[in-house]
Amino acid sequence: MRVKQLAVLSLALVLLLSACIPPGASTTITILYTNDEHGWLLPAEQNKRMSSGAAEMMGLWAKNEGYPNASTIALSGGDSWTGPAISTWFKGEPAAEAMNAMGYRAAAVGNHDFDFGCDVLKQRRDESRFPFLSANVTTKDGKPVDFAAPYTLLDVSGIKVGIVGLSTRETPQVTKRENVSDLEFGDYQAALKKYVPEVRSKGASVVVVLGHVCLAELVTLAVQVKDLNIPVMFGGHCHEAANRQVGGTWLFESGNFYHAYSRVDLNVDVASGRLTGVKVKLVKNEWEKSASPAAPPDSAVKAVVDKWQAKADTQLNTVIGYTQKGIARPWPMYNLVADAWLWAYPQADIAISNVGGFRQDINAGEITFGDVVGVLPFENSLYDVKLTGAQVLQDLTCCGGVAASGVKWVNGRFILTQTGQPIDPQAAYRVLVNDFMYTGGDQFPLQKQDPNGYDTAINWRQPVMDWIMAQDSSASAPIDDKIDTEQRGTASR
């Protein structure tokens, strides 16, 4: 009898709740999306305006979106930590802690998230209160990886949301190859065809893709998987700020460095869980240099940032030089680094670096160890390779541009700085490069050109620090005039 009474009460409750949901009632799920944060936890000057900052972004979310709230989730497109010294020096731990404080619910695995190796990536995963996602990364023998899941399911305002992750297939070319040599970065389409139906079978009403994948690739992918009815794909890797619609799929990328976020509103029918509409907006996190941020920085996130900045200052705030004007990309910074390598290792004839490794400028004033770490945040060493002149010319003109020392571009050709003579295609040269380039990063063919390249074990930052200290610069004798500002390479980023 008691069981029957309970059953009647349960049925009555269901009917009552159903009666409370009017036909066609909908709810809105809001996604706040960033990508390629790269550890920019502090505000920075850009084009005479201030932008970035994790605490500033969290404050903006609170002011604009009423965040945190039950209907809003924050997602990241990956490349979360390699960047300024505050994050890089501690191998991304500060960025992970800040993202915890910001309440991120999931992050795609980006290529630079592998920069410190898979063991460190697993540490960051264990420290994070949100999952790392990548559906297209497996071991070489096809087994699941232990640092990421293919997808996650979130309950947002009573609606089950499935989030499937993707990592760029370029990863072996744009991180240290040894860090990912045991991994396979598989086809995006195949990964989604496998996992999107699985996520829906587990009750997801709405499925979105969280990808560290460039917008151009997402455009192609959206067409390839249009039968999966994926309403939203988030991208990253190319540092674009854009949104566009391809068929029934919206594609988003929010730039980089906490400069902006995308607000995406998904309107969902409560009864069926069916998506009925999408609204989008890109919001910039910037303000005039003479003014305050658009919203007060969040105190909890700021406390995290301040803690790690104090640790970084203790270890990295040693002053090693002084610049009156600042040292900017492209050519002043490129030339400084390449010249420092050749100065420290004069056995070589030429030094070449990929320009994608230069991640920030040095502002006017005192130069510290931390500034150099911010410029060259990756953990690379220098290789001494033996090349023919023809191979040197190939490397100088390929792969997105180079910084160079020992050569310069004059009247449409490269000449040797010491002799003023053109590079002889038949002659032999010793060339300094970084190990990222040597092992095929950015498509450089160096290891094929010289399979027996010599790893000097010299950290690529050390000669730069040593050269700056050797100049004994100060406010009364700045370093600026000792840095060549003329173009030498073939392109800049």
Image (cartoon, rainbow, N blue to C red):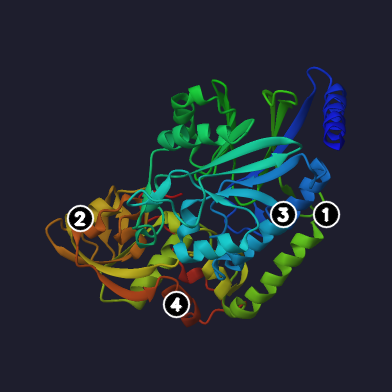
Q: Quadrant of the N terminus?
A: top right
How crowded is the residue under tag 3: few (<14 C-alpha within 10 Å), some, or many (20+)? many
How crowded is the residue under tag 4: few (<14 C-alpha within 10 Å), some, or many (20+)? some
Question: Disc 2 versus disc 1: distance between alpha carbons?
Answer: 54 Å
Residue 84 against residue 440 in the figure, above or below: below
- Camera sees residue 401: no
Disc 4 on helix, strand or loop?
A: helix
Q: Amino acid at mark 1?
A: Pro
Which residue lies under the disc numbered 4?
A: 467
How crowded is the residue under tag 1: few (<14 C-alpha within 10 Å), some, or many (20+)? some
Q: Amino acid at mark 3?
A: Met
Residue 99 against residue 284 in the figure, above or below: below
Name the N-terminal-most of marks 3 and 1. 3
Question: Disc 4 versus disc 2: distance between alpha carbons?
Answer: 29 Å
- As rendered, which of 123 and 113 lies closer to the eye? 123
Which residue lies under the disc numbered 1?
A: 296
Name the N-terminal-most of marks 4 and 2. 2
Disc 2 on helix, strand or loop?
A: helix
Question: Disc 3 versus disc 2: distance between alpha carbons?
Answer: 49 Å
